[in-house]
Amino acid sequence: MRQEIDRFLNYQRTERNASELTIKSYREDLTALADYLEEAREGYCPSPSEISSYELRGYVGALHEAEYAKSSIARRLASLRSFYRFGQREGWVENNPAKALRNPRQGRSLPHFLSAEDIGRLLSTPSAKTVSGKRDRAILETMYSAGLRVSEAVGLNDGDLDFRAGVVRVRGKGKRERFAPIGSYATEALNHWLGVRKLHAAEPSGADAPVFVNKFGRRITTRSVARMLEKHLKVAGLDGRTSPHSLRHSFATHLLDRGADIRSVQELLGHKSLVTTQIYTHVSTAGLREIYEKAHPRAN
């Protein structure tokens, strides 16, 4: 089975142009199944064609017993289905035993976001007098201003910044590119940071230079951004549940609160499907209520 897994991952990389993060997830999901089956069969790892739906149900049951999150189990099942669909196209399996497995039921949790006032407190927390403070403020301002995922923010290069047009080029999920507008606060913070940034000799210069780097001048990681945010949240006395992704949630919610249409927000977020964006309509009601009360003849 492990050989077929390698073929599948290579297909995702070369034919599907999948991101390294997607490939990493597939590898973890499929290797976990191979390890489970090898242990269940006392050291023998079967080929994909030898695996039955019954064995896969046992695997899913083991995940439930290990108290995996329902979302994690659903992701692993999706990986299995994709793996077997590839096997059917390649001709090394006839049936897809994962097709009959049902995803665990899960309620959709509402995204956590900060109010506009709390965002203001957070963004003013990093010191404007230190190098690290200028960098932290630039990161937070840019993520909130453009609604970026943390991976998109750390992946920015100098060539992605167009201050004259007021936009940044973003490489999102599935390597899809989009242009996201940034406001004056983010532009000012970025200019202050870039004026003091020092790059490590191993990092590229020019258009390919990383916008955000750590104290050693190397491209900053998503984990470092999370730790940085956690530090500033404590200083500002804000909700500890706030994650880097909460800035993106706040961006979307605040736009809808102030009258932006959902299709525009979808484009700004880089969502492939409108369904993904619609979750924000459940948490953004203040603006809609105000519009309703102004427009409906029998609202009051």
Image (tube, rainbow, N blue to C red):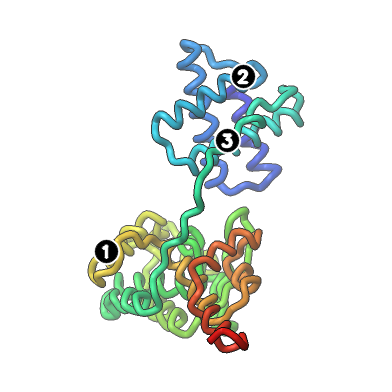
Circle 2 residues within 10 Å: few <14, some 14–19, many ≥20: some
Query: Is residue 98 in view?
Result: yes
Horizontal side of residue 114 vs 3, given as left or right: left
Residue 183, percent across and down?
50, 82
Q: CA distance from mark 3 to mark 1?
A: 36 Å
Number of other residues with Cα within 10 Å of mark 1, as a class: few under 14, some 14 to 19, many 20 or more: some
Kind of residue sitting beneath label 2: Ile
Sequence-wise, the earlier of marks 1 and 2 is: 2
Residue annotated with mark 1: 231
Is residue 35 shown left or right of residue 48? left
Q: CA distance from mark 1 to mark 2?
A: 48 Å
Q: Residues within 10 Å of mark 3 (few under 14, many from 20)?
A: many
Q: Nearer the viewer, residue 291 or 52?
A: 291
User: Mark 3 or mark 2: which comes first in sequence?
Assistant: 2
- Residue at x-position 30% and y-position 65%: 239
Percent of width and height locating residue 40:
48, 15
Q: Which mark is residue 97?
A: none
- Can you say whether 82 is above or below 207 in the image? above
Image-quadrant location for residue 179: bottom right
Residue 233 image offset from top left, x and y in percent: 29, 67
Q: Foreground mark, 3 or 1?
A: 3
On residue 77, which mark appears? 3
Q: How many marks?
A: 3
Instruction: Report helix, strand or loop for mark 2.
Output: loop
Task: Name the one closer to the observer, 274 or 39.
Answer: 274
Q: Which mark is on residue 51?
A: 2
Which badge, 3 or 1, comes first in the chain's sequence?
Answer: 3
What type is the residue that disc 3 sits on?
Answer: Leu
Q: Provide the secondary structure element on which disc 1 rests.
A: helix
Residues marked 1 and 2 touching at CB (< 8 Å): no
